[in-house]
């Protein structure tokens, strides 16, 4: 375990990866990201380049075209892209959640069909668990799959599904109906987005993002037997396999966004002068920014711990750290963006300076993929052993 003991000191290889991702992301930057978002377009060029350079699939098995590294490396990619103003939400979904689930639990055929494309970015896979009437309570989902001969017929509705319009497939979390007893149990299906009966409509969000959210309808969608991921009996384990990567990536996105906001603010307050020194000399501005920096660095450390535990195979240890990292990063980045707006005064609310654009996006880190309150529930019950209220 010597690697694990010292892994918060980054290896040369990881540092080189960080620099390479940052260099690529800088070439695009926030202007590109916002331009695409405002034009209702996708960041296809950035996605394609990140795929070609091996960044998107860095965590996926080499055998199927991935980089053979781990969640540490993928979270580093996410963090650096976000720190350069172009963090892509689909990184959380396609390689982290879906890539992990399929490469750990999919059949050989499923791995061959989906992983190489996810890894090189030539295909994107959306993820659909949230339902309008279930929300945070995923035990209450009602999307149901029943057998028809060897096929599956799926019916249900999902909401807030990111990027299904730019995806070739979506991993749907539903329940399968036992033919004999009628009992429902969780099941995961890969649904190609051109399957008849699958449709979506955009939700008008107040987030400036090239990746949009959708209501998704599954109206008697007929799928072949091999659309079911892995085994019908292992769905819970499969779903759990996606949770730690999801939270680590949520943390990485927030850490990156926090770094981005702090760096914009620092640049601005270092030169803006309205009294006899740059405004960054006033402790009313420098102290909150210093606090933001400390909080982001602490959240990052917990994220690195979570990724290290996860990559070492300690799923249980990783779960506590991943939840804590996601919580801490969400809080720290929301505060950092708010303080960046404040630091820029009126310019904090202009289009030109790009900080106002991050305000609603930064709140996302407190809500998705799992809300701040559900993380506090997890920590209260799992780490502290307190009773549940629900
Ligand atoms: C931009 C964006 C992108 C998203 N992308 C995806 C996606 O790609 N795929 C997908 O499946 N989903 C996606 N989601 C959905 C996201 O995961 C949910 O919004 C989130 O899990 C919260 O569910 P909800 O919105 O239904 O809120 P609710 O569950 O209705 O919760 C509302 C509030 O009540 C609180 N609350 C609920 N239960 C409890 C409790 N027991 N104790 C204390 N507080 C509680 C919550 O913390 C929250 O503050 C996305 C959401 C957003 C905003």
Image (tube, helix red, strand yellow):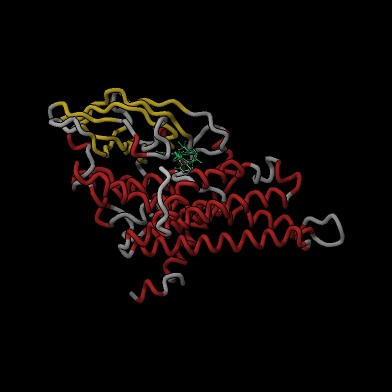
Report if residue 248 is visible in the image: no
Q: Nearer the viewer, residue 207 or 34?
A: 207
Answer with left or right where residue 228 lies relative to residue 285: left
Please give the name of the residue rendered at 47% of the width and 60% of the height, measured from the top-left corner: 20
Report if residue 377 is visible in the image: yes
Q: Residue furthest bottom?
A: 2
Answer with left or right where residue 62 lies relative to residue 386: left
The quarter of the picture where residue 351 lies is top right
| Residue 264 spot, x, y in % from top left | 66, 54
- Give the quadrant of the N terminus: bottom left
- Give the quadrant of the C terminus: top left
| Residue 274 spot, x, y in % from top left | 84, 54
Please give the name of the residue rendered at 66% of the width and 63% of the height, measured from the top-left corner: 290
Q: Is residue 118 above or below residue 193?
A: below
Please give the name of the residue rendered at 33% of the width and 45% of the height, measured from the top-left corner: 98
Please count the marks in the image: 0
Q: Residue furthest right?
A: 276
| Residue 194 spot, x, y in % from top left | 31, 28
Please give the name of the residue rendered at 41% of the width and 59% of the height, measured from the top-left corner: 383
Q: Is residue 247 above or below residue 298?
A: above
Answer with left or right where residue 254 lies relative to residue 147: right
């Amino acid at each position: 375990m010597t690697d694990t003991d010292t892994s918060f000191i980054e290896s040369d290889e990881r540092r080189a990866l960080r620099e390479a991702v940052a260099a690529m992301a800088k070439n695009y930057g926030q202007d590109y990201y916002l331009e695409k978002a405002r034009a209702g377009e996708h960041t296809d060029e950035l996605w394609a380049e990140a795929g070609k350079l091996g960044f998107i699939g860095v965590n996926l098995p080499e055998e199927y075209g991935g980089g053979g590294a781990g969640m540490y490396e993928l979270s580093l990619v996410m963090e650096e892209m976000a720190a350069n103003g172009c963090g892509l939400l689909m990184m959380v979904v396609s390689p982290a959640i879906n890539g992990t689930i399929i490469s750990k639990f999919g059949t050989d055929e499923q791995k061959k069909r989906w992983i190489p494309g996810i890894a090189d970015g030539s295909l994107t896979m959306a993820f659909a668990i949230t339902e309008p009437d279930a929300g945070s309570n995923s035990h209450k989902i009602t999307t149901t799959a029943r057998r028809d001969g060897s096929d599956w017929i799926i019916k249900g509705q999902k909401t807030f599904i990111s990027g299904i319009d730019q995806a070739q497939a979506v991993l749907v979390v539903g329940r399968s109906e036992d033919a004999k007893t009628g009992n429902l149990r969780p099941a995961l299906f890969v649904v190609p987005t051109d399957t008849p009966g699958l449709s979506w409509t955009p939700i008008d969000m107040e987030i400036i993002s090239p990746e949009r959210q959708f209501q998704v309808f599954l109206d008697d969608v007929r799928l072949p037997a091999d659309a079911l991921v892995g085994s019908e009996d292992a769905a819970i384990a499969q779903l759990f396999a996606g949770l730690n990567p999801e939270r680590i990536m949520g943390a990485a996105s927030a850490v990156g966004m926090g770094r981005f906001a702090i760096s914009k603010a620092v640049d601005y307050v270092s030169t803006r002068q309205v009294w006899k020194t740059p405004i960054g000399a006033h402790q009313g501005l420098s102290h909150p920014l210093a606090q933001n920096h400390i909080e982001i660095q602490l959240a990052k450390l917990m994220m690195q711990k979570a990724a290290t535990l996860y990559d070492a195979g300690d799923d249980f240890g990783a779960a506590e750290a991943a939840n804590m990292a996601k919580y801490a990063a969400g809080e720290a980045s929301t505060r950092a963006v708010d303080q960046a707006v404040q630091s820029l005064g009126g310019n904090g609310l202009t289009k030109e300076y790009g900080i106002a654009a991050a305000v609603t996006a930064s709140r996302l880190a407190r809500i998705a993929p799992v809300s701040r309150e559900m993380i506090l529930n997890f920590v209260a019950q799992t780490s502290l052993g307190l009773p549940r209220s629900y």
